Amino acid sequence: MVDYDFSGRTAVVTGGAKGIGLGIGRRLADSGCAVVVWDIDPEPLRTSTAADSFEAVFTVDVTEPASIDQAVQNTLAQVGRIDILVNNAGVSGPTLPSWEYPLADWDRVIAADLTSVFLCCRAVIPVMLEQGGGRIVNVASVAGKEGNANASAYSAAKAGAIALTKSLGKELAQSGIMVNCVAPAMVQTDLLGEMKPEYIAGLRAKIPMGRFGTIEDNAEMVAWLCSDACSFSTGAVFDVTGGRATY
Ligand code: NAD
């Protein structure tokens, strides 16, 4: 593991109570970062020792502007600044053909996987501008590059998160704030709970390295994107797909 030094820096990780977000939060904290978790359901942290790694854990719905504004205030009160924002919270939605996809699920997935990224960036960027810099990493998906069959809302939302990353990267290129996204392939987390087993098997078969991604594979890439070692990349997509992504 590369030994980054995040001491003196603070990070917000959305959806950090479990899965990939928990791994990202721990990776940053292990390198000295003061990490604050925003999650709509922090319960998994309360029943484990994982929360010990974090400065604070706040109950936040990242689809709700008022909840985010309150979280920014609470975070600044707790740790004073926000140097890193990892927009990781997300849901998958059901596995269905587009023409059978319920509008309520479409709206839920777009809100959780795309609008949330816009809202959290909109709330945190002014803080980073005031501080003179920062890092934003959005957790998208290879689904947003490729368009997975029977996951139209998820694929469209993640494609939107990728495009939003590119827009923000250009808007902020001279501000000291770098904005990038990661595009993971499948990782075995609770996110897979809404997916049909045959859909999961089909996506695993697409990975040339022949295995699922791990939480650590993704946390390591995010840590690099948050570190000073990453110095000339913004508005870019970083694949963590075991060879699946070809462009
Ligand atoms: P997970 O279900 O294990 O964790 C998701 C976390 O997000 C949970 O703690 C949940 O409570 C939180 N969350 C959901 N909606 C929220 C909201 N409105 N406000 C605040 N928190 C909310 O899932 P995961 O696999 O760890 O997924 C993390 C990210 O990685 C997601 O954006 C997901 O789309 C992306 N991703 C996952 C995979 C995979 O195969 N697991 C692949 C590609 C991308």
Image (cartoon, rainbow, N blue to C red):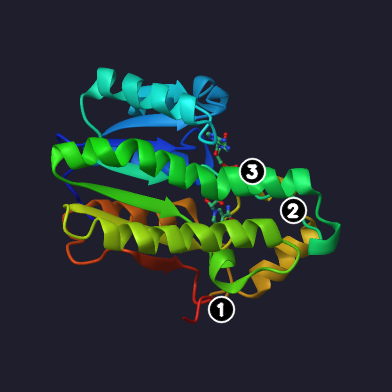
Depicted 5 relative to depicted 123: above or below: below
Q: Which of the two residues, 47 or 108, is positioned nearer the viewer here?
A: 108
**Ligand 1 location (quadrant):** top right
**Residue 125 got which mark?**
none
Please report whichever mark, 3 or 1, sits nearer to the chain's N-terminal start. 3
Regarding mark 2 in the picture, which secondary structure is present there?
loop
Q: Position of residue 49 (x, y in %)?
A: 44, 24
Q: Position of residue 75 (x, y in %)?
A: 32, 24
Q: Which residue is mark 2?
A: 195
**Residue 208 got which mark?**
1
Regarding mark 3 in the picture, which secondary structure is present there?
helix
Q: Which residue is mark 3?
A: 190
> Do callouts 3 and 2 mark residues in contact (Cβ within 8 Å)?
no
Give the CA distance from mark 1 to mark 2: 21 Å
Q: Position of residue 204 (x, y in %)?
A: 65, 68
Q: Is residue 28 at all visible to an observer of this figure?
A: no
Q: Is residue 100 at all visible to an observer of this figure?
A: yes
- Does any atom of ligand 1 lie closer than 8 Å to the CB of label 3? yes
Q: Residue at x 39, y 38 (%)?
A: 13
Give the CA distance from mark 3 to mark 2: 10 Å
Please report whichever mark, 1 or 2, sits nearer to the chain's N-terminal start. 2
Q: Amino acid at mark 3?
A: Asp
Q: Residue at x 64, y 43 (%)?
A: 190
